[in-house]
Amino acid sequence: MTKEEKQLWYKFLCDYPIKFTRQKIVEKYILDFYCSKAKLAIELDGSQHYTPEAKEYDQKRTEFLQSYGIEVIRIPNGDVNRNFQGVCKYIDIRIKEKLKGKAMNTKAIIFDLDGVITDSARYHFAAWKELAGRLGYKFDEDDNERLKGVSRMDSLNIILEINGALDAFTEAEKEALCTEKNDNYVNLIGGVTPEDILPGIAKFMQDAKAAGLKLAVASVSKNAPALLTSLGIIDQFDYIADARKISKSKPDPEIFSVCAESLGIAPENCIGVEDSQAGIEAIKAAGMKSIGINVTVTSVTPDMPLSSTAELDFAKLVD
Ligand code: B16
Ligand code: MG
């Protein structure tokens, strides 16, 4: 292999979401590149591999590895030189085929938005706090935990309930209070840019897409499309739930179920990512696996609890 080829391979294999090992030893053989998750070996063949003796040797070696359940892909050096991108694409396709139905049960990742993709949860809190302050109501961070994943009107009702004021306003007045909170919120998120995507999210999305998974957003926020546009990632998703058409707040599974149905993927093949207890309950009720991001209240434990989005690692899902 030339130095340039080595660099190209290094770049491809480093960037690839599923891990490869170089010079993997399997009994008496050394494999050029090996992906243990897919049980796939990549062998790079120079001209010395094309003599009848070498071909026979390689054939025996392939059969031996097959007896270990390892598939061997042989790539002539000439192909690497002529069309390296094509070779990478081919390896990618073979890996996906190998993982399909085996390790990769997951076919879609469904993301909550506020508190998962970006830290807009703190803006929701600030906007409600401003309204509560004007009304002379108590509202602190603990109270705010109950609002995560909950629709605008349901959130207002929780604040009113906390303050013994459930009957203090007519429906029209409550609508006006919700509008006031939303105006505060829209103002606060006005300066959001791609820089506000939480750590680890972009890489996790990129790796999932590279492995052929579908991505969706299950946010009950009516501001979700605007926020995703400001973050510059709205085009990355295969489906974005329309909060205006969702009639039940999390913990009801409706929004996650709608995402799975719209993607045409069974719930058991979906993973939901959430930062709220209501969201984790919704994911579980929808029959999906859950990743919890710093979920502090725990009536239902996430299948994979993480303390921040920076810990998201796509390779850990492929097991
Ligand atoms: P909006 P998520 C939810 O978004 C928030 O967690 C929740 O605090 C908010 O009240 C709700 O969206 C409605 O948002 O007022 O913008 O329509 O966590 O489901 O992404
Ligand atoms: Mg959330």
Image: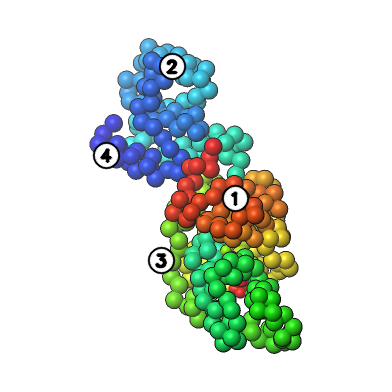
Evaluate whether residue 59 shows in this view. no
* 194 or 221, nearer to the observer: 221
Q: What is the secondary structure assignment of the residue under circle 2? A: helix
Residue labelled with disc 1:
302
- Identify the residue at horizontal 35%, vertical 27% (top origin): 23
Residue labelled with disc 4:
4
Structural crowding at the residue carrying mark 4, measured as other residues with C-alpha within 10 Å and reported as few (<14), some (14–19) or many (≥20): few
> Of the numbered discs in the image, which one, if any, rests on residue 61?
2
Residue 11 is left or right of residue 197, and the answer is: left
Are the residues at dot 3 and dot 1 in contact (C-beta closer than 8 Å)? Answer: no
Instruction: Determine the residue located farthest toward the left in the rendered image.
Output: 3
Residue labelled with disc 3:
195
Q: What is the secondary structure assignment of the residue under circle 1? A: loop
Res. 217 image quadrant: bottom right
Between the residue at mark 3 and the residue at mark 4, the CA separation in whole angstroms equals 34 Å
Name the amino acid, label 2. Answer: Arg
- Identify the residue at horizontal 52%, vertical 63% (top origin): 115
Q: Earlier in the sequence, mark 3 or mark 1?
A: 3
Res. 61 image quadrant: top left
Q: Earlier in the sequence, mark 1 or mark 2?
A: 2
